[in-house]
Amino acid sequence: MKKFWLSNIITLIITTLILIHYSSYAQTTNNDTNKIASKETDEIANMLDSIAILNIFPDTISEPGISLNPFFKLSDSSNMSYYDSIYRSGLYYLSLSSPFEYVYNENIKSYIELYGIKKAKLTARMLGLGELYFPLFEEYLDKYKLPLELKYLAIIESALNPMAKSRAGAAGIWQFMLNTGKKYGLNVTSYVDERNDPLKSTIAACQHLSDLYNLYKDWALVLAAYNAGAGNVNKAILRAKLSENEKLSFWKIKNYLPRETQNYVPAFIGVSYVMTYYKLFGITPVKPDFAYDEIDTLIITQPLSFKQICEVLCVPEDELKFLNPTYKKGFIPASENTPYILRLRKNYITEYIQNEYTLYNYNNEIIADKYFQQIAANSYTPNVNKIKKYENDNDIHIVKKGESLNIIARKYNCSVSQIMKWNNLKNPMVHPNQKLLVKQPNQNNNDSNNIAVNNNSNNNNSDNNKPKIIYHTIRKGDTLWGIANQYEGVTVDDIKKLNNIKENQKLMPGQKLKIAIDI
């Protein structure tokens, strides 16, 4: 019995000593880690911090929980440190199924704990963004026969923020410099930066990574060259003065690379570990307000502003900017010859189709930039013969500044669709001094007679053809102008008079409006 109690006491003492030792070790190690992180991870940590201001996540974000793992000791609830053996073991198993060499050292440990502990709340957001972007990355990495693990490279570069921009001028989710981006077909103008386009920049990144691997045949060197450029890597190789029998590796030239690049591969390894084993850190992904399969695209062939989209379709501005980071000034400079992509949630795609005329003519004055006015002018394709035929008649309207097709249609008691048809317009955008037919053109070149015949015909039928009353149910985003243009020959004034609608009266979703149409 005494031996039993003595044995238990000895075990307790030994256990206590071990815990004290590891607690002290963990505290010391973590202090060293913080020094490493604070001195060497500024660029990467700052990029990670940039996603804290993205307003696409739920308002309430809970702090990551802490897993009750028997392999680590929690000395302080805000200062957690896993034992080195756990990190080594995890990296070993990652290496078994990857072409990357996942080594372990103190520098790598600093990044594991940067993402897994110090910045765990932001890592939770990155995990959520990963569900949005990783399917896209993996699709093209696989297409180019590249390791799927390279998807984590975008985390190092931008923290998966498509609007990220470095102090050196690199932009987008893959952080392309201007010249490198142009080399891989990414167009940059005063209004458009395709380095910010998730799809196009991903394709460019895959091409760039393929070229670098063909050059070095080593993935760690590829990562270094992606960050510092092949020129700096080549200089480091020369300065390292490796012997002919010495195998080239990142670790042998590390000290000859720029400081940021020295930390680049360790950061990649650290991120790969945390993104794989995030549950061990008690981190739960925080997803954005929309998922990958909820996003769809539209082809835009005429100028469009974010303000028009937000106000007509009620799309949250932050969401619109996040999904369309390509457009630098909130304008899509599209035309028939140069179409662009608009990304929206699928429910807004329906709203777009239903309110297209309203959208493009809503508050035309907001497209005040001369560049976009020129685009609008270039997108107009007039029917020259019709214009010439009516040049001396009162059937030509010269567009004044601030006028839209809606205003012109009301003035001449016709519909927008009619004016577009008579003038062979492909879109409802108009520009000052543009000539428009505002009456049915004569197909037989006998203007006055044919017009008179048409008018008489209308008069004769006016008594016999009484208008039919139908009901239109108002949807979210509907306007009187947009509703009027859904029905041939119906104007805004017609709807107002028939429904006794006063000026500035708001339309309520679900409300039914009487519409008088000719039968």
Image (cartoon, grey):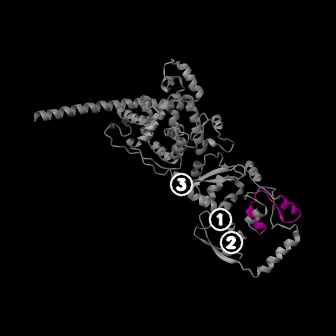
Which residue is found at the position 50% from the left and 36% from the top? Answer: 45
Q: Nearer the viewer, residue 281 or 198?
A: 198
Q: Would you say the residues marked 2 and 1 are in contact, meaning their CB atoms lie under 8 Å apart?
A: no
Mark 2, secondary structure of its residue: helix
Q: Earlier in the sequence, mark 2 or mark 1?
A: 1
Please state if 516 lies on the left or on the right of 250 as rendered: right
- Upstream in sequence: badge 1 or badge 3: 3
Quarter of the rendering occupied by the C terminus:
bottom right
Q: Quick one: 244 or 117, which is closer to the camera?
A: 244
Residue 222 sits above or below residue 497 on the image: above
Q: Left of 15 or right of it: where is 45? A: right
Q: Which residue is mark 2?
A: 496
Q: What amino acid is at disc 3?
A: Glu
Label 2 crowding class (10 Å Cα cut-off): few <14, some 14-19, many 20+? some
Task: State if disc 3 and disc 1 touch (CB < 8 Å).
Answer: no
Q: Nearer the viewer, residue 501 or 371?
A: 371
Rounded to the nearest angstrom, the CA distance separating label 2 from label 1 is: 12 Å
User: Which badge, 3 or 2, comes first in the chain's sequence?
Assistant: 3
Task: Estimate the spatial distance between the alpha carbons at disc 1 and disc 3, rounded to whole Å.
Answer: 26 Å
What amino acid does circle 2 point to?
Lys
Q: Residues within 10 Å of mark 3 (few under 14, many from 20)?
A: few
Task: Give the class, few, some or many, for how many residues have Cα within 10 Å of label 1's Cα (few <14, many ≥20).
Answer: some
In whole angstroms, how far apart are the C-alphas of marks 3 and 2?
Answer: 37 Å
Examine the structure image and report whether residue 391 is included in the region drawn in magenta: yes
From the top left corner, tell me how far across and down residue 343 is, in percent.
60, 52
Q: Nearer the viewer, mark 3 or mark 2?
A: 3
Residue 125: image x %, image y %?
Answer: 48, 45
State the SS at label 1.
loop
The answer to which image quadrant residue 199 occupies is top right
- Residue that mark 1 sits on: 479
Q: Which residues are magenta?
A: 384-413
**Residue 294 disc label:** 3
